[in-house]
Image (cartoon, rainbow, N blue to C red):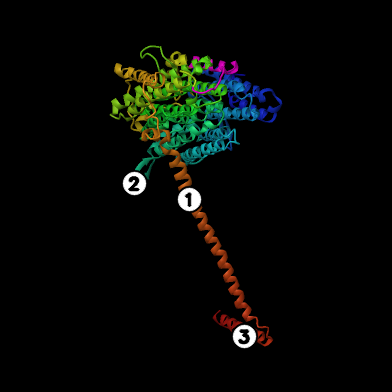
Amino acid sequence: MALEELAFLIPVLPALAFVITFFFGKKLPSGGAIIPIAAIAASFVISLMITLGLLANPEEVVSQSVSWFAVLNLGVLIDPLAAVMLCMVSFVSLLIHIYAVGYMSHDPAKPRYFAETALFTAAMLSLILSDNILQLFVSWELVGLCSYLLIGFWFAKPSAASAAKKAFLTTRIGDVMFLTGIIVLTADLLKLAGGFTEGVYLLRFDEIFSYIPELSAMQANFLGFEVSHLTIITLLFFGGAVGKSGQFPLHVWLPDAMEGPTTVSALIHAATMVTAGVYLVARTFPMFIAAPDSLMVVAYFGGFTALFAATMGIVMNDLKRVLAFSTISQLGYMMLALGLGAAVGLEAVGVSLFHLINHAFFKALLFLCAGSVIHAVGTHDMRELGGVAKVMPITAATMTAAALSLAGFGIPGTSIGTSGFFSKDPIIENAYLLGEHSGNWIPYIFSIVAALLTAVYIFRLIFMTFAGKPRSNYGGHESPSVMTIPLSILAVLALVFGGLTRTGFMGFLEETFTNSFVNVDIGSLAGLGGNEIVHAAGHEPLLILWMPVIIALAGLGISFVLYYLKAVDLGAVASMKNPVYKLLYKRYYQHEIFTEFFSIGVVYGIVAFLGQVVDVIIDSIVEAIGIVTVAAADALRRVQTGVVQTYATVVIAGVGLLIILVKLIMEVL
């Protein structure tokens, strides 16, 4: 049997591990952790072997499909885009599960934890494998359910339960938009195809892409403007990605998702959930590049999110919250990279996915290092730490490696650099190309300022946590090897993966939309969307190539002076009396605006008011019925006199009227 025929097992094995661990985990060592670890390891091996085969022949992708309700299908698609995602998700999830054996060792609910994380991984792998938009959406919703269960894992804590509900409800806004986009797309495809045809699966990606020119030609009147149906559909899809991948303004659930175990945070922020939105836009990229204005909307939202989140990261004092805002910011970079496809075409998919993969390594490492610190010292408030490197040297070294990768240190024009350098810098350079080509410099400004703030907040975390002297009596010790070995593996990947794979990775990803499953001409589709692709990458001025590194060094210098040398007294600046600091620390009053004012004040207020109105109306109707009934009964009671003569008179009169009426009717007929 060819290995490709086992592709369906990639999500099925972790799903089976969920069932076994959920029912029998209490009777197994470590809460049954070995079951999901073995299943995910098998999924990784299958994914890796298929990917290696695909590298040799990227045009012959793995495509399997079975009929589902005659006009729909369940299918597996492993092309270059899916292959790299499968390997990353299964590998990072495997390391996190191994690490969790030590991290969750004292938690009595280990079986439930490992069962839910196995299902979480299975849902994400299923999402990646989907060859049609409906199957992808079903897996998308399952990912959302698992995130709700894991964020609220410690459901006895009110803050955890609240964070889980917030994540579930916030992402539902995006999910409704995504589902609406699927409905609009289905209606348009049915109109174009003349209805469903047995054996033709309209919602499969190859069929959808074949109708892109016709979808682009369909126009709708929106607020007096003629808008392409393709623009409407892609923006609705992007709305789903905004919710899942934490883009402004639906990013508010991500910082609160820290209420779950740190290993859950690592899963959500590195391998699963938040990468789903980026994957959706990348998977449907041919639709986006053919839709007028859609990619520029993606670029603006991505660039602004990168900067917006970074401004909040520089004032947070909680280890995990700093990393949460870092995730939002880096997801903004990934979306910005895809949006820049309006200028660089298919290269945007390769650059965005390269940063997604590299980010998975260094962000999983950052969260697991934070978990190592919290596990050892019992606090995640950086103001209570300091000097942790002396008691946790391995954790300190690996987290510093992750910080260097996040900031993007390297030497332009060489193969020397961290993984983040080789993926984030091309995004900034592509933003420069967009500005040079179109005069639109806003995405470039967003990206370069966000890069400065990124270096500031991550080295602020390093210096406040690991350098100097302890600021509290936290004790501490290095974590066990079951935790430090995954850290060391991720640290190596965070440092060298980008340099080793950058050339081959980009070329491999460019085969995503030219293979045996789907074959589209990105250049002609760009023309439909009014996007002109430039081919100047790699020829930017020397200063532009060095600018991201100069900015990263400047951020490191700022943090070194402020938080290591402490050359400036930050007491007056980092004070609630400072309106700028207060604005950032309060997260631009997003909780007050979105939760207290809009959700509780406006939405709940309207619902409560309507509830009172309905109550008044129903009460009035019931009372009116009672009054009418009593009045009618009173009137009838007056007629019932009890006198026989009166009844006889009424009967005779009635019979007489009836006879007269019958006679009149007979004469007319």
- Magenta region: 471-493
Disc 1/disc 3 C-alpha distance (Å): 61 Å
Residue 58 versus residue 85: which sits nearer the camera? 85
Q: In front of the other: label 1 or label 3?
A: 1
**Residue 491 magenta:** yes
Name which quarter of the figure residue 592 lies in.
top left
- Circle 1 SS class: helix
| Residue 450, image x, y percentages | 37, 26
Q: Which mark is residue 653?
A: 3
Q: Which residue is mark 2?
A: 224
| Residue 149, image x, y percentages | 58, 34
Q: Which residue is mark 1?
A: 605
- Circle 2 SS class: loop
Disc 3/disc 2 C-alpha distance (Å): 70 Å
Q: Which mark is residue 207?
A: none
Q: Earlier in the sequence, mark 3 or mark 2?
A: 2
Q: Quadrant of the C terminus?
A: bottom right
| Residue 560 higher or lower than 527, as above or below | above
- Circle 3 SS class: helix
| Three-letter amino acid code of the residue under disc 1 | Gly
